[in-house]
């Protein structure tokens, strides 16, 4: 099928032969660089936090602990992931549909707003005007510019999503592809749809809060804030899940030639995410006043489990597609011969597969457990919660995105990685560190150790409180895991930055095989 | 391939192992969906979510009356208050304390009212490990029956400013 590219604004990929829209390529590069900068800020914050929660080290003073915690949450959960996701949308909409990017003006607006908003938020937090943590639960109040910065990022991201929908529209109009869109595009579109209602929730909750911080609105109901904020906070994590699963399918194809068994099943699972995940965000309010037990149970039971069903399906179809591809190549020995023969030295593959395992077994099981009304009474606001989401968002999404970067840099920056041996080790180091840290968090949390807490020995409190030695041991595990995962993260950033700026150009030749 | 447009006829029912897996996963989800409400009624361990609107000033007034009427002692200058069995108990959260110290009887049922004077707080009872959200404007009512005696710690597990880690309290069961 002929594309709709303007002359001189397209190239054929030297490795895959796929068409690359040069406008899209420029913005994917910009978003990738911006994403890695946010990842670095969030990563430095992460190691400072890990070394503070490790009681034997207890590095930061209390004010800086909460400040850096705010910084970490914003940069990691929102800025890094959202920036890279916009890049993924541009890639899916152009290269996979053989289309040009709909609008460079919108793309500049998206990039500018997200960059400005992210930078502004970081400055406000660092000067101590936004010590409200990522959730900024009212009536805790930050400087108005803090809320404005979040709104800027959200509006920027929304413009990027609109540009993606516009790109799909012109691709369809110009008939640049035949039949249904590829699976990766379908998954990316599911992520984009969830992004729209996520960001609308963000507007509904953040605009009044911004006006409240300016004194123009008298009060914001804290229960209402939590209800709507989690429509933003939880649904935004489902953008990540959709994008991550799409990246799993993409990396499975790039690294092993995998092909989904039944596309109708895979696509139906993405539709489940769109339909049910927003309602399932009720599980954040399981021990709240103001919402009834009936409301909590109804929303979390049926809706959450149908969203879980979607993940269960992907957890089968993704490795199954790899298995079929590997068996077809002749790796047919025994039950798991195909898995042993998989390209474990390829960081794109190992990052993708470890992400699948950590997300599915670690993050998925803890998530379903914590989301039940009964267990939530034990787990709410303890370290079990971050233990869960570091396995979904860090061991899952961030690790999968790292794997993606091992292809993104050679294919779209057209630069080769240095020190390829280190790159092969990096996913294992990061995955091991994150798993170790998250397990330390989960077990410490099961003793009741609170999350977002500077001193679990309660030094100086009127009535003494504290935890026994086993909880402290688990906080030590958290600390060691944090150090390991930070090393993995630093290695990733070092390798990626070195490749982008000083890597050997592979223009005109296929990328060096991993 | 996941990156190519699927060939015509891709929309078909799953077969073989895939069909079995989707069926098993769905059955498991149905089991879990039923378990949550089932255990809500069978286990009787859950809050019904009972709550009322209250301003911080109104709530503080009720706490004051409650302390005046039922104070039985003092600890570190804080009143120890024993509510009547079957009656109402009040716990006031504010930066950074839980007020007052409650003294309950094992096997008796109480209606525990919690609200905040300022920011959101997290009621966390240790070492039992029970956690509930406490917010300004909401009178959060838990119907509780202590099943073991001893001295319990109350800490805050919702970030409430720089002194968050100093926010502790005490709950006694005899």
Image (spheres, rainbow, N blue to C red):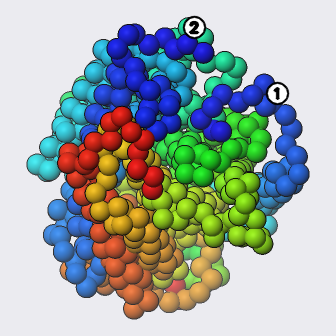
Count of all numbered marks drawn on residues in the image: 2
Residue A124 can be seen, yes or no:
yes
| Front-most of residues A450 and B119 | A450
Q: Which mark is residue A173?
A: 2
Position of residue A402 in the picture relative to residue A384 (left or right): left
Q: Is A380 on the left-hand or right-hand side of A34?
A: right
- Name the residue tied to disc 1: B9
Judge from the rendering whether residue B30 lies leftward or rightward of residue A104; answer left or right.
right
Q: Nearer the viewer, residue A23 or A153?
A: A23
Residue A133 drawn above or below residue B9? below
Residue at 76% from the left image edge and 36% from the top image edge = A264
Label 1 residue SS? loop
Which of the 4 image quarters holds residue A7? top left
Same chain for mark 1 and mark 2? The answer is no
Quadrant housing the C terminus of chain A: bottom left
Query: Residue sitting at 55 percent across and 23 percent down?
Result: A97
Residue A251 location in percent, x, y?
A: 54, 48
User: In the structure shown, which secondary structural element does the residue marked by tag 2 occupy?
Assistant: helix
Q: Is residue B79 above or below residue A285?
A: below
Name the residue rendered at 20%, 45% in the picture: A501
- Residues tagged 1 and 2 counted as in contact (Cβ below 8 A): no
Within-10-Å neighbours for mark 1: few <14, some 14–19, many 20+: few
Q: Measuring from the top left, give residue A100's x and y in whole percent.
A: 44, 17
Residue B54 seen from this side: no
């Amino acid at each position: 099928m002929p594309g709709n590219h303007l002359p001189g604004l397209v190239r054929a990929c030297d490795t895959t032969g796929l068409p690359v829209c040069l406008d899209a390529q420029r913005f994917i590069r910009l978003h990738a660089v911006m994403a890695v900068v946010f990842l670095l800020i969030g990563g430095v914050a992460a190691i400072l936090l890990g070394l503070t929660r490790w009681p034997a080290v207890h590095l930061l003073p209390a004010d800086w602990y909460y400040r850096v915690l705010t910084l970490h949450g914003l940069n990691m959960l929102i800025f890094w992931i959202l920036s890279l996701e916009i890049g993924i949308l541009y890639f899916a909409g152009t290269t996979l549909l053989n289309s040009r990017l709909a609008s460079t003006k919108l793309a500049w607006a998206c990039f500018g707003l997200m960059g400005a908003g992210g930078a502004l938020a970081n400055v406000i937090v660092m000067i101590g005007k936004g010590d409200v943590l990522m959730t900024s639960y009212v009536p805790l109040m930050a400087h108005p510019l803090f809320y404005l910065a979040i709104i800027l990022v959200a509006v920027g991201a929304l413009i990027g999503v609109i540009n993606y929908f516009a790109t799909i529209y012109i691709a369809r109009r110009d008939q640049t592809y035949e039949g249904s869109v590829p699976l990766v595009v379908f998954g990316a579109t599911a992520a984009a749809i969830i992004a729209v209602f996520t960001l609308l929730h963000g507007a509904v909750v953040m605009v009044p809060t911004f006006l409240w911080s300016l004194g123009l609105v008298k009060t914001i109901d804290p229960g209402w804030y939590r209800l709507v904020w989690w429509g933003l906070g939880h649904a935004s994590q489902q953008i990540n899940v959709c994008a991550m699963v799409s990246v799993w399918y993409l990396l499975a194809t790039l690294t092993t030639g995998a092909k989904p068994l039944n596309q109708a099943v895979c696509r139906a699972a993405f539709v489940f995410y769109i339909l049910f995940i927003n309602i399932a965000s009720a599980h954040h309010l399981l021990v709240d006043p103001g919402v009834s037990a009936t409301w909590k149970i109804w929303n979390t039971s049926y809706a959450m489990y149908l969203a879980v069903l979607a993940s269960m399906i992907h957890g089968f179809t993704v490795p199954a597609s790899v298995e079929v591809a590997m068996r077809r190549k002749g790796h047919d020995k025994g039950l798991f011969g195909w898995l042993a023969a998989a390209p474990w030295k390829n960081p794109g593959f190992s990052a993708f597969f470890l992400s699948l395992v950590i997300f599915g077994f670690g993050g998925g099981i803890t998530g379903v457990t914590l989301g039940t009304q009964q267990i939530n009474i034990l787990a709410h606001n303890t370290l079990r919660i971050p233990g869960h989401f570091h396995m979904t968002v860090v061991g899952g999404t961030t690790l999968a995105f790292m794997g993606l970067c091992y292809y993104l840099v050679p294919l779209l920056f057209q630069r080769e990685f240095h020190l390829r041996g280190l790159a092969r080790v990096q996913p294992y180091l990061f995955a091991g560190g994150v798993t170790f840290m998250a397990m330390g968090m989960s077990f410490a949390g099961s003793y009741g150790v609170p999350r977002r807490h500077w001193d679990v020995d309660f030094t100086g409190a009127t009535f003494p409180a504290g935890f026994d030695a086993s909880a402290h041991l688990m906080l030590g595990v958290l600390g060691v895991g944090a150090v390991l995962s930070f090393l993995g993260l630093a290695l990733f950033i070092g390798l990626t930055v070195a490749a982008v700026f000083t890597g050997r150009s592979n223009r005109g030749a296929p990328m060096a095989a991993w | 391939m996941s990156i190519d447009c699927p060939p015509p006829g891709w929309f078909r029912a799953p077969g073989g192992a895939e069909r079995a897996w989707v069926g098993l996963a769905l059955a498991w989800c149905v089991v879990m969906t039923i378990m949550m409400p089932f255990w809500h009624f069978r286990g009787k361990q859950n809050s019904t979510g009972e709550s009322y609107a209250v301003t911080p000033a109104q709530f503080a007034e009720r706490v004051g009356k409650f302390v005046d009427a039922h104070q039985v002692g003092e600890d570190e200058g804080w009143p120890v208050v024993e509510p009547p069995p079957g009656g109402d108990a009040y716990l006031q959260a504010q930066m950074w304390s839980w007020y007052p110290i409650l003294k309950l009887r094992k096997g008796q049922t109480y209606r525990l009212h919690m609200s905040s004077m300022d920011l959101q707080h997290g009621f966390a009872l240790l070492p039992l490990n029970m956690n509930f959200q406490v917010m300004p404007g909401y009178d959060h009512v838990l119907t509780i029956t202590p099943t073991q005696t001893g001295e319990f710690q109350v800490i805050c597990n919702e970030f409430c400013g720089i002194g968050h880690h100093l926010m502790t309290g005490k709950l006694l069961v005899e």
